[in-house]
């Protein structure tokens, strides 16, 4: 996998900006901090479904699409689901997660994190500074409100995640 960028994230349920860093998803497993504010989530690839929301077939298809996005554009996007935010607000949780993993290319700061915490009923799309113009907060909020939440309300979390990912991928290509 390509070199990744650290993100500094701000607003819950919307996109936000980030700053640069440098690591890889594979390397992040050994760098996870034991600090209490550090999410205990180990990356498994483009899709890390610790809340067990996404069936294996859909997870594989999403991973292939996210890999193809990175191959075509250089932008890296990951999807993460978690059982719990461990008492943190979603912005703090996503910031800690992104800092531990690093998403996107350091020289472009072009990573995207789509995070879903079903137990807290929270969703967040966070982007690096390099994609602020392509994925502004208003657009990400619209994707959450129009593509994801209606499906979540129907109890179909996996389809909502896929719809959000599709909208983001379409915007990035």
Image: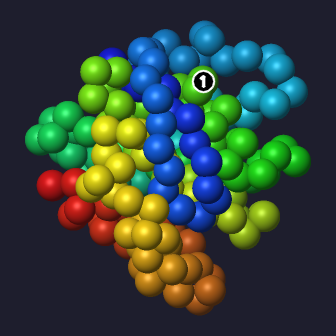
Residue 39 against residue 134 in the figure, above or below: above
What residue does disc 1 label? 100
| Percent of width and height locating residue 170 | 21, 63
Q: Nearer the viewer, residue 118 or 139?
A: 139
**Left or right side of 98 for 104:** left
| Percent of width and height locating residue 138 | 43, 69
Residue 131 against residue 42 in the figure, above or below: below
**Left or right side of 172 for 60:** right
Name which residue lies at 56% across and 35% down: 8
| Percent of width and height locating residue 6 | 49, 26
| Quadrant in the picture for residue 51 | bottom right
Residue 106 in sight in this render = yes
Please state, as top left, top right, bottom left or bottom right, where the N terminus lies in the image.
top left
Name which residue lies at 27% across and 29% down: 108
**Going by the picture, which residue comes out furthest to the left?**
72
Residue 142 against residue 131 in the figure, above or below: below
Q: Nearer the viewer, residue 66 or 9?
A: 9
């Amino acid at each position: 996998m390509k070199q990744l960028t650290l993100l500094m994230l701000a607003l819950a349920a919307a996109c936000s900006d980030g700053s640069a860093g440098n690591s890889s998803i594979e390397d992040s497993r050994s760098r996870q901090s034991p600090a209490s504010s550090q999410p205990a989530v180990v990356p498994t690839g483009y899709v890390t479904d610790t809340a067990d929301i996404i069936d294996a077939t859909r997870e594989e298809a999403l991973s292939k699409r996210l890999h193809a996005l990175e191959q075509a554009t250089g932008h890296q996007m990951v999807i993460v689901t978690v059982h719990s935010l461990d008492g943190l607000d979603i912005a703090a949780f996503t910031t800690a997660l992104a800092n531990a993993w690093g998403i996107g290319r350091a020289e472009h700061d072009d990573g995207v994190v789509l995070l879903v915490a079903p137990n807290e009923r929270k969703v967040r799309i966070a982007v690096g500074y390099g994609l602020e113009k392509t994925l502004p907060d208003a657009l990400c909020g619209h994707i959450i409100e129009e593509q994801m939440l209606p499906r979540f309300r129907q109890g179909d979390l996996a389809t909502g995640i896929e719809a959000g990912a599709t909208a983001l991928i379409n915007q990035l290509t």
